[in-house]
Image: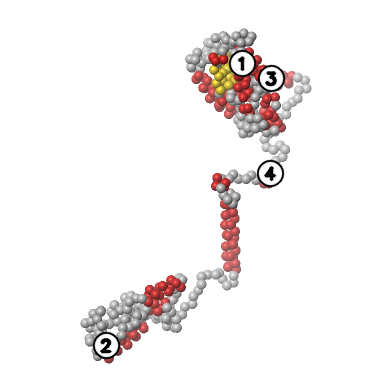
Amino acid sequence: MGKPRLIILIRHAQSEGNKNRDIHQTVPDHRVKLTPEGRKQAEDAGTKLRSLLRPDDTLHFFTSPYRRTRETTEGILRSLTADTPSPSPFPRQTIKVYEEPRLREQDFGNYQPCSAEMERMWQERADYGHFFYRIPNGESAADAYDRISGFNESLWRSFGEDDFASVCVLVTHGLMTRVFLMKWYHFSVEYFEDLRNVNHCEFVVMRKNQDNGKYILQNQLRTWSELKKERAALPDSPVPVRKTWGGCPDGCDHEIKNLTKRQAKRQDTADLFREDGTTSTQQFEQAMKRKSSNAKKVSQAQDEQMDDPRGRVGPPQFNLPYSGDSNDTRTEQLTRGSPRKRSESLNRLSILKAGRDGGGSRSGAGSRSGSSDTETVEGDLEPKAQRPSSMALALNGAFDDGQSIRSGTRADALGDQSDMEEEEEGILERLEAENKSFEGSVC
């Protein structure tokens, strides 16, 4: 079939929201139903549509999913297909009905506020401009224009189908009817805002021109500018006063409200499972307070130390005894660590094996000529008892009575030679010289 010969836009019949706006405070907008007067208007619209059609016409209906538009469509179909006063040439089974969400009403938010606030919002929208004014938590007419543009493109593509109907009927809302015409005929924003709303069940007819295939609008749309001219011609007509909507005309107290009333911060998922009831934000604030408090305590302690006449408290000082003249190198005898670690170090030093002559760990200790390490000679001196080295004696406090390691002390390769060992070796040499049982000489 191609393009339909007629495109008819019909606004829904009277609804309960049109009769009482307060109903939107308790009933969602998409569930508002028709009034008894609205049902009668819908059936009358079906009779009027029947008079505009040809017996050979086919119909496609596109309706908004809102309850008031669906009930309007049902009323139109009921009278259109009725066999009174004469049999209808349009059986119900031949008519296709599509529910199109893009034809829904402009969103005015969820449940609407009180009547006074809604009246204030309608006045503000009239001064701001119907097209760009966005309803709080809802849409602007510009938002509705975007989705109706997508529907127009889909509708235009469907015109290329061979089985498309000869008459296309769109059952929608007042603002959406004007937005549809704005998109189709490229109305300006100023002209759109000058258009008045269409009446309930009013037909807006677009007829195709057979010569060029374009659709010609058959209605004379009403405008606010014409209404103002008519009212201006009346005697004693009131001059409208434009209100000031921006800012705070009655005085601003937002700063005081913000300081006295703080909204609670949103909790995260972890806060819901915290046993102490504190949120992550509260825990962070508490941690910052503790950190600040600790920093203050440290600062106060440092100030007290600086003010102390005895000076700042430092690490403990140890006075250790030294021997020798002033030119001797003083060696500090300080073993750091716990007593347990110090005793373990001394035990390791005390179990060092003595040399062949009991002289400690010196490898060059004197021995009998021709003897081996394991030989025992009769008459030998008893082997010297195992004794710790000079370093072990120092750690054990052997020099606490005034003795000390003097500078210039000769040490062997392992660093444990001392003057005491030299004196003991001298005594050993004298005994060996007197004892005739020794063979050889002592190196």
Counting residues from the start of the chain, the first of labels 4 and 3 encountered is 3
Label 4 with label 1: CB-CB less than 8 Å: no
- 282 over 326 or under it: above or below: above
* Residue 182 drawn at (x, y percent): 59, 22
Counting residues from the start of the chain, the first of labels 2 and 4 encountered is 4
* Residue 425 drawn at (x, y percent): 32, 85
State the residue in front, 330 or 351. 351
Q: What residue is disc 4 on? A: 257
Q: Which mark is residue 37?
A: 3
Counting residues from the start of the chain, the first of labels 1 and 3 encountered is 3
Q: What residue is disc 2 on? A: 379
State the residue in front, 143 or 343. 343
Q: CA distance from mark 4 to mark 1?
A: 57 Å
Report whether 420 appears left or right of 256. left
Instruction: Indicate the secondary structure of the residue bearing disc 1.
Output: helix
User: What amino acid is at disc 3?
Assistant: Glu
Q: In the rendered image, is residue 371 in sight?
A: yes
Counting residues from the start of the chain, the first of labels 4 and 1 encountered is 1
Residue located at (22% from left, 86% from top)? 440
User: What amino acid is at disc 2?
Assistant: Gly
Q: CA distance from mark 3 to mark 2?
A: 144 Å
User: What amino acid is at disc 1?
Assistant: Arg
**How would you rate the neighbour count of disc 3 (Cα within 10 Å): few for under 14, some for 14-19, many for 20 or more?**
few
State the residue in front, 433 or 37. 37
